[in-house]
Amino acid sequence: MLTNDETLHFIAQHRNDSVPQLALAKHNTPNIDLPFALDQIAGWQTACQKLPSWAENPNILYPPHLSMEQCSSQTTAQYKADVVWQITNNLILKGETHKAKRNTTNDELLTNKCERTSFVDLTGGFGVDFSFIAQRFAHATYVEHQQQLCQLALHNLQALNLNQAEVVCCEAESYLERMQYTSCIYLDPARRDKNGAKTVLIEHCSPNVLELLPKLLAKCKVLAVKLSPMLHWQLALVKLRELGAWVRQLHIVAVKNECKELLFLITNGSYEDNGNNHSTNENSADAPLNKLNFKGEQNVYTTKDTEITCYNDGACFRYMLAEAENTPQTTLQTNPQAEMFLYEPHAAIMKSGCFGLLCCRMGVEAFAPNSHLFVSNNEVPNFPGRAFKLVSVSSFNKHELKTALQGIEKANIATRNFPLKPDVLRKKLKLKDGGEHYLFATTDAEGKHWLLVGKQCHTHSLAPNVE
């Protein structure tokens, strides 16, 4: 991973320049490793937005452009580090409390716990997630089968002063066979099938989490699995439950209203871990995890016992799955009117589909069963998403449209449960893009098309936590 002084000087001199132009330009210094330099310049430019703490570190080395585009952002990596440590810490502390003598203090328990915590990332990659999560643990192991990435990780972990971390160049499945019991295992499986096509099914990811699940759960207290935001998470919960796993928490993570990833926090679903339940028998990893727990007792947890957290830019909407399934969506029973407030849930809420619970907690009504838009007569200040005040409402009658759009030359257009796409509707309405007005074209429960014209309430750009 070392390079010469000429290349380092070139990187420092040109790191704010256009990478495509640098690639095409002629350079008089023959000793420059240009491909390496261009990767470092492009990587640093991406990191300035995506990984600002890494961009501030002059010793960090970056991978090729594609890896930088695919790696986690600092925002999502920090969030995962927080929630992974929180659940692991709680379970460890619970087990230590169970075993502790009465004269052991909480401070002593915490000290002992910290000295023994360990973390293994079986799919290390560029190492962004690993570096943020590893900071919380006493010992951390990065596992990756690509030699080049291992060399890069070893350099960067030293640059980040993560002295408790070790790098192992190995296949995940091979390391899993021989590894010791650990506090937490993390997996970010590749989400492409053998033909290179993207997949949304958990069993098509590599490594196959479902096939490895018995061994994974036998080797850790908490299994954290990051999966595609396109994944059918409800089906994944069922499949994991059928194999004896309890998804204690599912985190749907969005940044700037774009769903980025799903994080499953999993334990063996059949027992309460008191710190003594994991086996030291190597063959125990091969035992099937079915509906009987390690004590032979009947399984008591279901998918409904999963806590869902919808996260977007620091705001969380948290609920138990059973609560959402038992809360029906309420629907607007009258025609929409100007002066009403219109709400669009953020991307994590949209992915979760907890619309009935949203109505119940926030005091809003769905515009229609499939609109994914919500309304209220009075403003709801803490709604998790964007809010708009309706200035006009119209059917698609030409005369009504002309009245509703009077004085509006440009607008932001969205369609929800509507036959036309936004660009097609924009041409039909003869409007330019942008401006202060937001147009939502949608369909009510009776099949009537509506155009809702509003202005955004900017106080709703970031809602606080809602539980």
Image: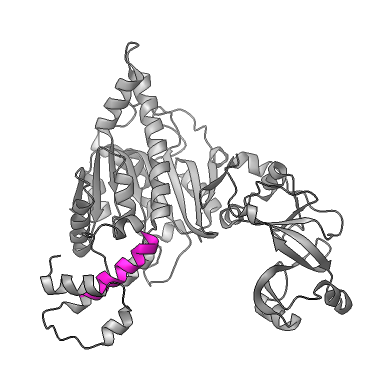
Q: Where, quadrant-wise, is the N terminus in this rendering?
A: bottom left
What colouring method underlies this structural image?
one colour
Front in this rendered view, residue 95 or 203: 95
Determine whether, in the image, residue 450 is placed left or right of residue 295.
Answer: right
Q: Position of residue 433 (x, y in %)?
A: 65, 77
Determine whether, in the image, residue 440 is placed left or right of residue 242.
Answer: right
Please give the name of the residue rendered at 38% of the width and 43% of the height, measured from the top-left corner.
Answer: 223
Q: Quadrant of residue 191?
A: bottom left
User: How many labels were placed on the picture?
Assistant: 0
Q: Where, quadrant-wise, is the C terminus in this rendering?
A: top right
Front in this rendered view, residue 361 or 224: 361
From this viewpoint, which residue is outermost toward the front? 13
Q: Position of residue 130 (x, y in %)?
A: 30, 50
Q: Is 1 located above or below residue 386 in the figure?
A: below
Please give the name of the residue rendered at 43% of the width and 57% of the height, measured from the top-left corner.
Answer: 203
Q: Is 424 located above or below residue 336 in the figure?
A: below
The answer to whether residue 202 is visible is yes
Q: Quadrant of residue 402?
A: bottom right
Q: Is 164 located above or below residue 278 in the figure?
A: below
Q: Position of residue 41 (x, y in %)?
A: 27, 71
User: What is the chief secondary structure element of the magenta stretch?
Assistant: helix
Residue 39 highlighted magenta (yes or no): yes
Please give the name of the residue rendered at 42% of the width and 36% of the height, measured from the top-left corner.
Answer: 87
From this viewpoint, which residue is outermost toward the right? 399
Q: Is 29 located above or below residue 336 in the figure?
A: below
Over which residues does the magenta segment extend? Answer: 36-51
